[in-house]
Amino acid sequence: MGFPDYLEAGQRARLLPVVSESNKENRLIGPVLGALPLIPELSKELLGQLGVKIGTRSKVSCFTEVVFKKTKDMVDNSSRPDGLIVVDNGRTQWRCLVEAKFGNNKIGQSQLERYLEIANKEPQIDAVLTVSNEFAATPSHSPVSISSKLKRKCDLFHLSWSAIATTVDLLLANDEIKDPDRALVLHELHEYLRHPASSIAGFTQMNKEWKDVVKALVSGARLPKNDVGVLGVVSSWHEEQKDMCLILSRLVKRSVTLKLPRAHLDSSAEWQKATTDTLLSANRLTASIAVPDAAGSLDVEAVLSRRTVTFGMRVKLPEDIKSTKARVNWLMKQLKLATDPRFYVRLNFPGRREAAMLELTAIREDPDILTAHKDLACTTADVLLVDDQGGKFAGSKTFIEQLENSLLVFYENAVANVRNWQPSAPKPVKVPERELEADDQGPEEKS
């Protein structure tokens, strides 16, 4: 594809960007855009997250520092879009403006609104993509609150740098690039993105008001839903949920995602409202993470009043074993690595009977404590790690550090080793020989 005739200025994206040292955004986004046309697998995976289908005949072209002829007066030299992605499918084209931020720089609302105005006036533009160290649950969620009027004619997407780097990591780890030259290019891009100079970072701390919000809610104070600190806590928690998924994705080399209701996937505002309601009414922050082939969802619950973070996963226990003790012993064999004293198991019984919560260390030391529940067998068990953070809970950095450390302990020692019980296939039914002999007789012989 040649240089688009609707552009006033711009240049084809290069793996080795020729821009000034001060233009850090372009020096980081340039190699990513430069790699997309060269590596179809990367284009398919990365743009697929935006809902764009890349077929065998699709042609991807990328440009940097673009200026459109029609709207050139709307953008000055200091704020022109960082890039343009064009996907040519023959009969149709999909075009997306790209705006990237480096390091701690955040996506600016006024700048983003200006690019959306350009996209709305340019018939060639279908979407705007922002990239920064900010996190969003899905690419359709944006870290910036934007009027729906500006998104009527074009889509708005967001990817964190960490999400892009993780995508590259998974492609390489799963050996999905068969062409050696493409694999080499992607490997170099991986090294470039992971280098400290790229300043790609995970989510490292809650908002600055986190300590005050925790203190207020623990003391019983009633905060309004539009409180700046409350809104900041909700936004920070949403970012941390996505980062937990990326951490686990890199750990297991599979795509780990958030489990969200359809209403929350479709609307970040609805998700924000639901999280705010739970925070203010129950002093809790919750998350549910879907790990491929795990026994169940990995659930996270931070309880402000107790200053604890609990990680849990529900496991189905054997139905062909009668007693609670035997069923729990079946589970304990899978939890041999769960020696941390913070591990618990919560036994769930049918009907209205209250669940029983026991320490794994206590069960190991005295298995007979399970006989207290011998009158009714438990059906499921929740494997839990209860992290009592104490004073660290109110620290915006220490809360995240402790949470992510415990997440890895829970996954590596429990989630990775536990499976649900499944009934065995039915056994062949052996027919007595005398019945077989009777069936072999003819009608006259039987009479």
Image: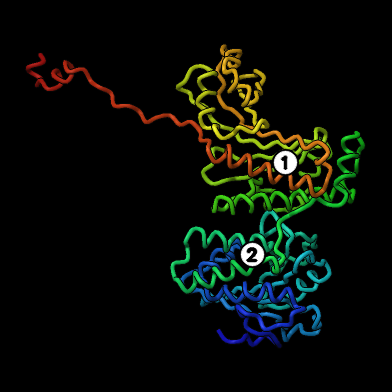
Q: Is residue 209 above or below residue 170?
A: above
Q: Is residue 81 above or below residue 370?
A: below
Considering depth in this image, is 90 or 421 the residue closer to the camera?
Answer: 421
> Is residue 143 toward the left or the right of residue 338 in the image?
right
Q: Is residue 46 visible?
A: yes
Q: Identify the amino acid type marked 1.
A: Thr
Residue at x 65%, y 85% (from the top left corner): 11
Residue at x 62%, y 83% (from the top left corner): 12
Q: What residue is disc 2 on?
A: 194
Considering depth in this image, is 347 or 388 the residue closer to the camera?
Answer: 388
Q: What residue is disc 1 on?
A: 286
Q: Residues within 10 Å of mark 2 (few under 14, many from 20)?
A: some
Q: Nearer the viewer, mark 1 or mark 2?
A: 2
Q: Is residue 169 above or below residue 353?
A: below
> Residue 69's x, y, as percent?
72, 86
Q: Identify the amino acid type marked 2.
A: Arg
